[in-house]
Image (tube, rainbow, N blue to C red):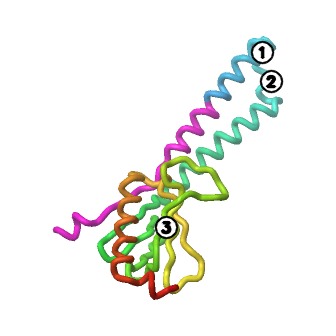
Amino acid sequence: MAERAKKNVFTYKLDFYYQAIVIYGVTLIAYAIVVGFTKNSLDFVYRDQVVYLLAFCALASFTGLLVNMISRRTIIIEPDKIVFANRFHRREILINAIVWIRIGREKKLKVRGSYKVAKIKLMNRRRVLRLRPSLFRPEDALIEALQAINATVHKNGRLKQTF
């Protein structure tokens, strides 16, 4: 029971997709109303490229929402491992295999959130894993959990062995 209390589950945020669907839908309806009143007809709907473009964007946002709802991406942080899971795949990273975790800003992109990216260096992997905490809910708890793991790694002294 105590082990279950230390298990943190972080789910993928879908807010962006909902907002995009609403924005494209409202823009499509507003455009149809404005142009319909100016032309006194709704025949333009079948021939106007702007309507097609807005409908395509709304459909693409809806498709992205469905794909992400079906995949159900989650991060599970347990006392001895970090699990990256979705409906179809599960990847476990043992805490013992982590060299360091750095939480900072992404230099290439400007992303909202207090911390932009978490880089995780593993012993058996040349490239670092990049994780965007702002894409998961609750963001602050995920950052705290990653910082706690990093403090554990530093306390064990594995950082000095790699340099």
Contact check, label 1 and label 2, Cβ < 8 Å: yes
Q: CA distance from mark 3 to mark 1?
A: 59 Å
Q: Is residue 118 visible from the viewing direction of this image?
A: yes
Amino acid tagged 3? Arg
User: x%, y% of residue 32?
Assistant: 71, 22
Front in this rendered view, residue 56 or 123 = 123
Q: Residue at x 25, y 66 (%)?
A: 6
- Circle 1 sits in a helix, a strand or a loop, which is it? loop
Query: Circle 2 — which element?
Result: helix
Inspect the image, locate mark 1, and give the three-letter code of the amino acid beneath it.
Answer: Ser
- Reading the image, the residue beneath label 2 is 44
Instruction: Choose between 51 and 46: the one closer to the eye.
Output: 51
* Residue 102 tag number: 3
Q: CA distance from mark 1 to mark 2?
A: 7 Å
Query: In the rendering, which numbered label is found on residue 41?
Result: 1
Q: Which element type, helix, strand or loop, lies under badge 3?
A: strand
Establish if 69 lies above or below 57: below
Residue drawn at point x = 34 percent, y = 67 percent: 148
Give the quadrant of residue 155.
bottom left
Tell me which residue sits at (49%, 67%) in the image.
102
Q: Which residues are magenta?
A: 1-25
Q: Earlier in the sequence, mark 3 or mark 1?
A: 1
N-term-proximal mark, 3 vs 2: 2
Tell me how far mark 3 sits from mark 2, CA to CA.
54 Å
